Amino acid sequence: MKITDVASLAGVAPMTVSRVINTPDRVSPATAAKVRAAIEQLGYVPNLIAGGLSSRRSRMVAAVVPTIAHPMFAGLIQTFTDSMRVAGYEVMLSLSGYGENDKEALLRTLLGRRPDALLIAGAAHTPGAFQMISEAGIPVVEIWDVSRRPIDMLVGFDHEDVGKAVARFFLTKGYTRFATISADDPRAVQRTHSFAAEIARSGGTIVGEATIAAPSTIMAGRKALRGMLPALTEPTALFCSSDLLAFGAMTEARFHGIPIPERLAVCGFGNFELSSASEPAFTTVNVEGAEAGRIAAGFLLQRLTGNGPKVEGHVHVPFSILERATT
């Protein structure tokens, strides 16, 4: 895709397209709108590096994750960065948040810097984002999800499988009443819906459900549990989409004198340090996030230098339920 293609579609000169990209204040709003519409339609990614440098390796890799506030993403990025740096590559980190509205603009800016490779959390993309990533012409690793249509390389796990596994774990312990507290990001929703569906198939009853705006926080967990207190009169098993929510729910339960696990069994997700350090330590789902970062770096280095480990292009990261005192 060239700047002349954008100019042709917008009906302007290539220089006008360049001005819209670099000095938009020098172009009329109407013309700028036409050019931006053409850029959007074509999925054009402007080269923000000087032409004399654009053909050279930048030795920079772009990484896009929703947040580093959660230890699972922080650990992943740390091991990924360490592995890439040893090989002489620096990582440019961008935080996408949990909404899709700004991701295309973020990707356009990142790819315009001409990174040598891209790591991106998640495998669900808008059509525009999918087009930009697919046409970037660089190695790409999608991480943290599975996909029937991976763009290039994939390192992830099935969030629906996690939900089913937690449901079966609780069911084997004889619970018949269940509750969920979940963030509203797509991956958390997948886990929670899968959990609820498995409970329904097995004849259990969901007595409480709460959804909070991502990202998850301890206080959100407390508030959500407070809202379902009337339903917790009998033994109930609670699945939370993150350990932060689980810790908040447990704190609120103790405040109201609800015994754990006798009346409220709790399972979180993420295996944050919080889960083993809390009192009581609580059951959680462990995903090998740090290992996923190392595998992703290996994929990219193999493609970039030929010196990375010889691994398949798609890897499913294992997860396990770590049973502790709350179940």
Image: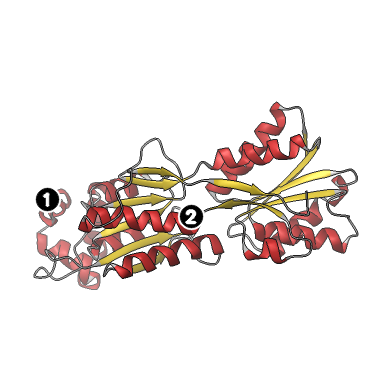
Does residue 76 appear left or right of residue 197 in this picture?
Answer: left
Residue that badge 1 annotates:
8
**Within-10-Å neighbours for mark 1: few <14, some 14–19, many 20+:** some
Image coordinates of residue 22 in percent, x first then y, are 21, 70
Q: Which of 14 and 291 is in front in this view?
A: 291
**Callout 1 amino acid:** Ser
Looking at marks 2 and 1 on the same chain, the residue that comes earlier in the sequence is marked by: 1
Residue 97 in the image: above or below residue 318: below
**Residue beneath the point at 55% across and 64% down:** 71
Would you say 129 lies left or right of 96 here? left
**How did the renderer colour the structure?**
secondary structure
Labels in figure, total: 2
Which dot, 2 or 1, sits closer to the camera? 2
Task: Report whether 318 appears left or right of 131.
Answer: right
Identify the residue position indicated by label 2 in the image.
Answer: 99
- Residue 98 visible to an observer of this rendering: no
Q: How far apart are marks 2 and 1 (CA)?
A: 32 Å
